[in-house]
Each structure stands twice: as structure tokens, then as C-alpha cells.
Amino acid sequence: MADLVMRVLARLWITLQPLGFPAAVMGGIAVSFWKHVRATQDVDLLVGAPPEREEELLAVLAAAGFRAKREPPVIELGGFRLLQLLYEPEGSFMDVQVDLLLASTEHAFQALERRLPAPVPSAGIEAAVLACEDLILFKLIAGRILDRADVGALLRANRATLDGPYLVRWAGKQGTLAALREIWEEALPGESAPEP
Amino acid sequence: MAGELLPPPDLAPTVSPDVTHEECLERWIEVMNLCEAFLLAGLRREIGPDGDLQAAYREWRRKRREEKDAHTIEWVRALSRAAERSGG
């Protein structure tokens, strides 16, 4: 399954490149990149595709074999647009789900600007991944116990390199600062969370 | 709250500060393969030696996706609310 997911990520990345949209891996693969290895079976990407180029994005993905999970393919939820796709590599007996979150907010675009290069094992390509702080901010908003545990593990594994003021500033703006402080105290006992 | 999310630092699995991101992704592949082996063993036990393992795996994934999709929709709504709070 891991090989399948990596093949789909590589295919997706290569398909998106000619469009020139900034993109970054998020979700479980990104969490693993940031030293908290855990299982995931899907590919989740944040993509900076403007609404006026959505049709072009869909056409390019369809031509590469990615099929929309529903009609219409893009769901609008608040200010965000979500595109869910399925891709079944040749010779596989199952498909892999791909969720593209189309960026539309100040934080999402800033997160794309801060993305980092990430090698895709066995595919020989370099993708990009969200910075650890932005991954934490997205997970704080998700708020499930699994996401909170991910945040704690990410804080612990990446404490030395985290941009604390950036993290706290955005958590404050997004209304997740109290949750961040609570998780910080548990992950890093005796160490105060940075002040805004 | 304390102690609910994570093991205490002295009991937690250690991550070498020198581990590279590439090594992390290689470990992710190992973890995935190991989890899948256990999952398939559990499904085989459920369906018996003559059951269709590929069909059982697909059905397991279908159920997981339903759960994940429901969570994803809620998460995106929460992102929108957070964006409103932060002024866009």
C-alpha cells in the first residue's frame, strides 16, 4: 500500500507541475516527514489553484487518469474548495484517494509560500511539504483527538527548529491558541509556550 | 488533560535529532507495510481461508473513507470558521 500511495503522489505531482500552481503535501504523509511516523492511505495536498483555472485543473487531472469522486467535483465549504479524486494505478486492485484543498485564505497562501522540498521515496522526484508550523496549525483546527496527538508529537519531535512566534501568532488569529498551549504543556512539560 | 495525548517524554519513543526527512518517509513505508500485513492477517481471520481477501480489503477501505470524508468536510468547515476569525 505504501508503494501505491507513493506512486500516486508522484503521478499527481508530475501532473500538476506544468500548471505552475504552488502545492504542498499535508495530512499523514507530511506528519511522517516531520518525524512522527504514522499510517495513512490517502494523498492530501494544499494547492494554490485560482478559481478561474479550476476547469483547466480538472481537465489535466482527468487526462492523467484521476477521476472525480463526485459531481460536481469541487465542493465549496465556507471560503474553501475541496476536490476529491480517485486514482487506480495500472496493475493495482485498488485505488487511492486524493484530496486537494484549494487555497483561498491568507494563512493557506502563506503556508504555500513556506513549503519545503520533500523527496518522494522510490519515485525519484522531489515534491513539497507544508512547514511543520503550518501543519500544526491545520491540525489544531481539525481538533480530533488524533490530530491533537499529532500536534503533541510534532511539537516534541521538532521543538528545536519550530518558529514559535509564527505558530502562536496564527493560532491566536485562528482561535486555537488555548488548544496549542494545552497540548504544548503536555508535550513539553516545564517549557512555556511562546508568547504572541 | 495531562497524559491523555502522549506518553511522558521519558517513556516516549525517541527520535534521533539527526534523522533526515527522507529517512522518516522510508520509516513511514516500513510502518505502512507492517500495519497492512497485520490488517490483512486480521481480515483473513474474519473471512476464513476461502474468503476473498481483496474484496474484504476494499470493503475495509470503503468504510474508512466514509469516516475520513465526513471528518474532512467538518475540518474544511472549521478552516472556514478559523479564516473568518483571522480576517480571511
Image (cartoon, coloured by chain):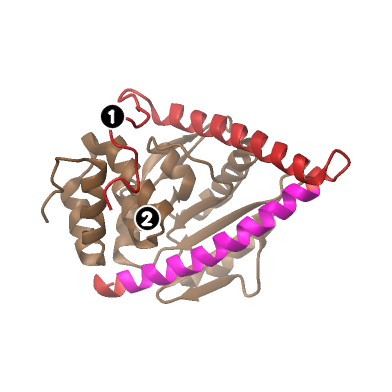
Chain colours: A brown, B red
Q: Secondary structure at mark 2?
A: helix
At horizontal 20% and vertical 54% (from top left) the residue drawn is A181
Q: Position of residue A115 (x, y in %)?
A: 35, 46
Tag 2: residue type?
Lys
> Which quadrant of the figure contains the C terminus of chain A?
bottom left
Residue A74 pos. (x, y %): 56, 71
Can you identify the residue that label 1 sits on? B10
Q: Is residue B18 above or below residue A170?
A: above
Task: Please give the name of the residue rendered at 34% of the width and 67% of the height, measured from the top-left corner.
Answer: A105
**As shown in the figure, which amino acid type bears the numbered disc 1?**
Asp
Mark 1 Cα shell of 10 Å, populated few (<14), some (14-19), many (≥20): few
Magenta-colored span: B55-82
Q: For residue A142, which quarter of the picture?
A: bottom left
Residue A37: give x, y in percent of width and height: 45, 36
Closer to the camera in the image, A1 or B10: B10
Q: Is residue A81 left or right of residue B63?
A: left
Return the residue at label 2: A139
Q: Does residue B68 belong to the magenta stretch?
A: yes
Please rate how many residues cluster around mark 2, counting C-alpha atoms within 10 Å: few if below 14, some from 14 to 19, many from 20: many
In which quadrant will I find the N terminus of chain A? top right
The chain to which mark 1 is attached is B
